[in-house]
Image (tube, rainbow, N blue to C red):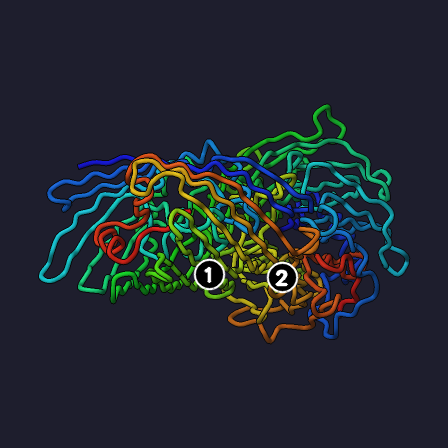
């Protein structure tokens, strides 16, 4: 059994404030992906993959104030071409369902990838709440309502979309995630990870200790499907010399083909020296372990989308509009001053877009969930693509 | 973020002796007991409000300081200061170089005729050479662009020739050695490139007596023969003698102490640049390495200052005092006389934060004309009275 599907978003995004002031509007194709699944032996053997084409559609990143990571700042970085390619073996051991998954993909840590979530705008906490695009080996055990997973992987993040994980570092980092699904639609999760030198491929950078916890519920409200997620994350770096926090909550309410959604986030990010003449890129590779300071971003994002085609079909066409308001503040000392850098601290953003899907699995693909986690994911809640 | 410091013996001994005389050193090699007292602000400070200050060098009646990163202006300027009779700096010129984000290192040749600085972060990153025929207004001679940038550049004098030892960073880090001949058709000539492991790469270099100490972060300090004759090394063909990773790695800068009181060349002082939030907090210790056998260096002592980390050094060798830039910890003076072992906290002579709390983040220090000068990223160039 095999399936293949594709999806992408045409988005026109406005940002009221750029580094050094001024506004900007961009029209981009974001998240263009092909997803494929194959299974054999009554789904005891599974292969899942996502191929991401952002290397060609957003080589300079997606206009997203507050976003950061992998050398991008105020731009959401493009993901690697082979976003995930994981094979899983799934079986039973006594009363437990067990699995072993390996390949390139997500480590067992944190919440679902933002590409599987409500808002188009990637949260600021992407690098605090997910660990992805690694050479990973994950074991999972699902016993009744409780699932435990553990991953071994390489600590290094990608430096550019065509780059493969540094397999020589495989096993230098690990994570564990405990998930409880007491009743259908309700899920609680807690994760911990030790990630060696994520921002320096050679391994010279400091170690991150990461915590994450979340709760998620889906059920009817007023007779219409309702979904809510709240997550907390904390990352310590260099034995606690640097500490970054994040809180995020999001909810959606589906009124027939129309979805209303809202996301709140308060997340801290490190501020690094930018490249001269390219203020949305930070200097790579790192040469030392200093930062310019920490900023705290508080964001409110409100959106509405409407499916124009019948639910359950092989095609999706969903126009949407999303509005964000954000503020930035300096946390602690350091030379980074957001007032100086952005000529202000308030940001408005708006996106008009249309999501296009082709294939029945285009929006049921559980990115980052492998083996027993895939089965538990389908049990716990449906997905909430923007 | 570093600078380079060199005190060159081969071909530079005369300059060293002149400098010692200027510092009041005795003809017997200096006093045997380090001084006591405080570091006292004499002048300067809060004099570069639009930029963050980086490295410094003082020669004669002039000082030169670099700039770093972005404040309200980019760190693309080299500041030229006149020192009055009391040694107080006043700005007389500023050289702005388009296409660089930071002037990362500054140094004047021992004869005072040439100024070099390194630039990084930008399309015009590389090595810049200026004439100091008019020390108040340096004039451009030549440049050598290095796309990934040069983090530091320091003079070395070997076999009657003048060289620059530069740190190529980031990306494919390497020690780059240039011959400097200002009157030649090609004033800057690359003579060798020695790759350095990308273990955060290469920061500072200290060159003395034909030995180059390459500070290579978590790879440690790499000791090269670049012309002392012992192992056949030369600037064109450096020969690795040994390597040592001091406690915690993060090897950033070094000073090989030639003690005129004892005649020893026993100790190498290593600066560890740890984690930091620039302008606020820092970390990293001073490590002392016994290099009496260059082939077998070993750490013997260290100094730790809680809540702060060290950066560049200058040594008052006749008085056996190490001056260390200590970022938010200000400037620290250590007694380095006699035998050094274990914890050197009792060796602290004096400490000061010239800009005050919240306005001090010292990049570098240099002793000249009997006074100590300090470059503060936040509050500019200071003149201090030594203990």
Identify the residue at image location x=43%, y=53%.
A197
Q: Residue at x 14, y 61 (%)?
A: A96
| Element class at badge 1 | strand
Compared with A59, B38 (above or below) is: below
Give the vertical position of B181 relative to A119 (above or below): above
Q: Identify the subunit bearing mark 2.
A: A
Q: Using residue B286 as the reference point, say whether residue B333 is left or right of it.
A: right
Q: Chain of mark 1?
A: A
Marks 1/2 in contact by CB < 8 Å: the verdict is no
Q: Would residue B244 be visible to someone looking at this image? A: no
Query: A34 or B354: which is nearer to us?
Result: A34
Viewer can see residue A263? yes
Q: Please name whichever residue, A199 or B196, is drawn nearer the observer in this view of the structure.
A: A199
Point out residue B286 in the picture as x, y percentages from the top left corner.
Answer: 57, 63
Residue at the image position 9 percent from the left and 61 percent from the top:
A94
Percent x, y of residue A89? 17, 47
Q: Nearer the viewer's eye, disc 1 or disc 2?
A: 1
Disc 1/disc 2 C-alpha distance (Å):
19 Å
Q: Position of residue A341 (x, y in %)?
A: 67, 51
Q: Nearer the viewer, residue B230 or B387?
A: B387
In the picture of the structure, the residue carrying the numbered disc 1 is: A248
| Image coords of residue B126 (percent x, y) | 65, 36
Q: Quadrant of residue B152?
A: top right
Q: In the figure, B148 relative to A287: above or below?
A: above
What count of labels does the image hold?
2
Asked if marks 1 and 2 fall on the same chain, the answer is yes
Q: Which residue is mark 2?
A: A330
């Amino acid at each position: 059994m095999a399936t293949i599907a594709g999806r992408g978003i045409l988005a026109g995004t406005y940002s009221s404030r750029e580094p050094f002031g001024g506004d900007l509007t961009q029209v981009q194709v974001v998240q263009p992906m092909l997803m494929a699944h194959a299974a054999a032996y009554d789904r005891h053997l599974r292969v899942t993959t996502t191929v991401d084409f952002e290397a060609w559609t957003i080589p300079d990143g997606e206009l997203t104030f507050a976003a950061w990571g992998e050398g991008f700042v105020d731009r959401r970085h493009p993901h690697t071409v082979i976003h995930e390619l994981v094979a899983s073996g799934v079986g039973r051991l006594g009363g437990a369902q067990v699995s072993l998954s390996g390949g390139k993909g997500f480590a067992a840590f944190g919440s679902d990838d933002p590409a599987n979530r409500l808002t188009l705008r990637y949260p600021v906490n992407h690098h605090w709440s997910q660990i992805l695009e690694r050479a990973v080996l994950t074991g999972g055990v699902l016993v009744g309502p409780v699932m435990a997973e553990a991953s071994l992987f390489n600590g290094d993040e990608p430096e550019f979309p065509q780059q493969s994980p540094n397999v020589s570092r495989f096993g230098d980092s690990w994570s564990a995630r405990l998930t409880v699904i007491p009743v259908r639609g309700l899920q609680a999760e807690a994760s911990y990870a030790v990630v060696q030198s994520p921002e320096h491929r050679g391994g010279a950078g400091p170690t991150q200790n990461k915590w994450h916890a979340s709760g998620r519920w889906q059920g009817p409200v007023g007779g219409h499907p309702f979904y809510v997620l709240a997550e907390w994350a904390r990352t310590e770096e260099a034995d606690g010399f640097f500490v970054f926090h994040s809180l995020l909550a999001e909810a959606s309410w589906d009124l027939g083909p129309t979805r209303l959604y809202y996301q709140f986030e308060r997340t801290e990010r490190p501020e690094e020296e930018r490249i001269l003449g390219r203020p949305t890129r930070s200097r790579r590779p790192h040469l030392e372990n200093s930062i310019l300071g920490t900023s705290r971003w508080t964001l409110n994002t409100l959106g509405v989308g409407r499916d124009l085609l019948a639910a359950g079909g092989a095609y999706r066409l969903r126009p949407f509009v999303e509005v964000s308001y954000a503020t930035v503040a300096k946390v602690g000392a350091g030379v980074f001053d957001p007032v100086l850098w952005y000529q202000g601290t308030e940001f408005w953003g708006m996106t008009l877009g249309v999501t296009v899907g082709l294939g029945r699995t285009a929006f049921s693909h559980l990115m980052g969930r492998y083996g027993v986690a895939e089965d538990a994911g389908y049990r716990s809640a449906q997905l909430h693509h923007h | 973020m570093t600078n380079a410091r060199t005190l060159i013996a081969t071909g530079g001994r005369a300059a060293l002796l002149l400098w010692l005389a200027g510092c009041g050193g005795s003809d017997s090699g200096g006093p045997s007991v380090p001084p006591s007292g405080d570091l006292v602000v004499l002048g300067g400070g809060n004099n570069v409000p639009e930029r963050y200050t980086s490295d410094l060098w003082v020669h004669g009646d002039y000082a030169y300081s670099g700039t770093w990163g972005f404040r309200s202006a980019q760190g693309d300027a080299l500041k030229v200061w006149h020192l009055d009779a009391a040694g107080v700096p006043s700005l007389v010129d500023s050289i702005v170089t388009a296409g660089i984000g930071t002037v990362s290192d500054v140094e004047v040749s021992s004869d005072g005729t040439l100024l070099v600085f390194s630039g990084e972060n930008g399309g015009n990153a590389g090595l810049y050479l200026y004439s100091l025929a008019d020390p108040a207004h340096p004039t451009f001679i030549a440049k050598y662009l290095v796309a990934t940038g040069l983090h530091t550049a320091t003079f070395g004098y070997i076999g009657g020739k003048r060289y620059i030892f530069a740190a190529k960073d980031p990306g494919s880090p390497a020690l780059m050695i240039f011959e400097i001949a200002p009157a030649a058709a090609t004033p800057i000539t690359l003579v060798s490139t020695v790759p350095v492991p990308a273990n955060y790469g290469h920061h500072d270099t200290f060159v003395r007596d034909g030995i180059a100490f390459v500070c290579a972060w978590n790879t440690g300090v790499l000791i090269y023969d670049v012309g002392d004759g012992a192992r056949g090394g030369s600037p064109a063909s450096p020969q690795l003698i040994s390597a040592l990773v001091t406690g915690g790695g993060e090897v950033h800068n070094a000073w090989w102490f030639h003690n005129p009181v004892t005649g020893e060349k026993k100790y190498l002082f290593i600066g560890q640049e740890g984690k930091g939030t620039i302008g606020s907090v820092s970390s990293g210790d001073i490590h002392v390495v016994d290099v009496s056998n260059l082939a077998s260096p070993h750490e013997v002592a260290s100094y730790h200052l809680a809540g702060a980390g060290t950066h560049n050094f200058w040594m008052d060798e006749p008085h056996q005092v190490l001056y260390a830039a200590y970022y938010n910890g200000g400037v620290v003076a250590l007694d380095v006389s006699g035998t050094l072992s274990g914890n050197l906290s009792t060796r602290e002579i004096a400490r000061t934060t010239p800009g005050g709390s919240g306005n001090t983040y010292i990049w570098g220090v240099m002793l000249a004309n009997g006074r100590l000068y300090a470059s503060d990223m936040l509050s500019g160039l200071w003149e201090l009275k030594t203990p």
